[in-house]
Image (tube, grey):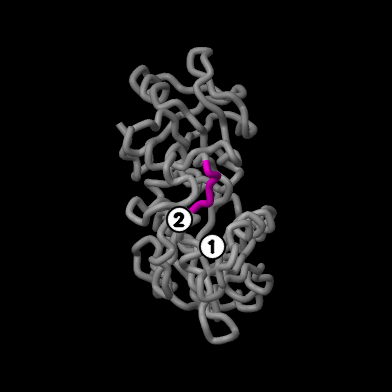
Amino acid sequence: MSERFYLVLDDRGLLTVAGDDRATFLQGLISNDVLKVSAGRAIYASLLTAQGRFLHDFFIAALGDTAGGESFVLDAEGARLEDLRKRLMLYRLRSKVTLAPLADHVVVVAFGPGTQAALDLPEEAGSAAPFAGGVAYVDPRLSGLGARLIIPGERLEAVAAAGFKPGERAAYDRLRLSLGAPDGSRDMPVEKALLLENNFDELNGVDWKKGCYVGQEVTARMKYRALVRKRLLPVRIEGAVPAPGTAVTLDGEEVGEMRSGSDGWGLAFLRLEAVETAEREGKPLSAGGAALTPLKPAWWNAA
């Protein structure tokens, strides 16, 4: 792929977090360090249950508001945006903070060779800069995922003017799947999934120095006691893409399950021991009649 493309993600929603206490409010709740967020940097983070289970993931960028100050804007799942707002509101108490949807902006992904340069962004994941009345930033998970833009809906012409053509969701999904990046609750069961089994450490979604947050104890224990035995991994699929939840087997034994998939690529939640056995013995995994070949992406650092 030599061309650059853009795509409006109409399944995403935006939530502003404003007020004097916005940073301290979020800092005690989310898995990443919100103090890193600035006009030049965005982050990826998650909100967990007290037991360390996944509730929501989102990107956080700084956005100037109409009053001349700044707010944080959370790029999250659109269908679950109100649930995220309500869960955050439970912790507001006396904090000087407001949470409100941002309805007149859209989330755009831009991808393809030279994406960062075309948007005047550094190559580093998370690098951000103002763009078209909003903000553009390199995907904080992996720079290979391109850039994300939060801009007024009427400013899409600025993306085209930067050298991007309208793209297809299938092309972006193939990119995401091949790099092993989860897409919220499509790939991580709510109130069940654990961050480190779903690549949040490798994808820059956890800060280990920031201090306490909701669910931090369980997450830290998994890391420092090396308790990760299963992991969400990209798989190449030969045959029809299995439906999410389809059991994955090796020699007839269940070793995981499928998550999202598209056009020969997918994500599967797999026992690492089975992945190593399949690789050593040259055997494919099976799911719903399809053959799956697990891949170890560039961020892989597990034993």
Q: Position of residue 286 (x, y in %)?
A: 53, 22
Q: Would you say the magenta stretch is mainly helix, strand or loop? A: strand
Q: Nearer the viewer, residue 264 or 188?
A: 188
Residue segment shown in magenta: 45-50
Callout 2: helix, strand or loop? helix
Distance (Cα) linking label 1 and label 2: 9 Å
The answer to whether residue 47 is magenta is yes
Q: Position of residue 220 (x, y in %)?
A: 38, 42
Instruction: Establish if 126 lies above or below 236.
Output: below
Q: Nearer the viewer, residue 159 or 41?
A: 41
Q: How many numbered circles are shown?
A: 2
Q: Nearer the viewer, residue 67 or 148?
A: 67
Callout 1: helix, strand or loop? strand
Instruction: Establish if 183 lies above or below 294.
Output: below
Quickly name the residue at label 2.
Answer: 145
- Give me the residue at 31% from left, 39% from top: 301
Q: Amino acid at mark 2?
A: Leu
Quickly name the residue at label 1.
Answer: 109
Q: Amino acid at mark 1?
A: Val
The answer to whether mark 1 and mark 2 are in CB contact below 8 A is yes
The reply to whether residue 208 is in sight is yes
**For the residue carrying disc 1, how many other residues have a C-alpha within 10 Å: few (<14), some (14-19), or many (20+)?**
many
Q: Position of residue 111 (x, y in %)?
A: 48, 61
N-terminal-most mark, 1 or 2: 1
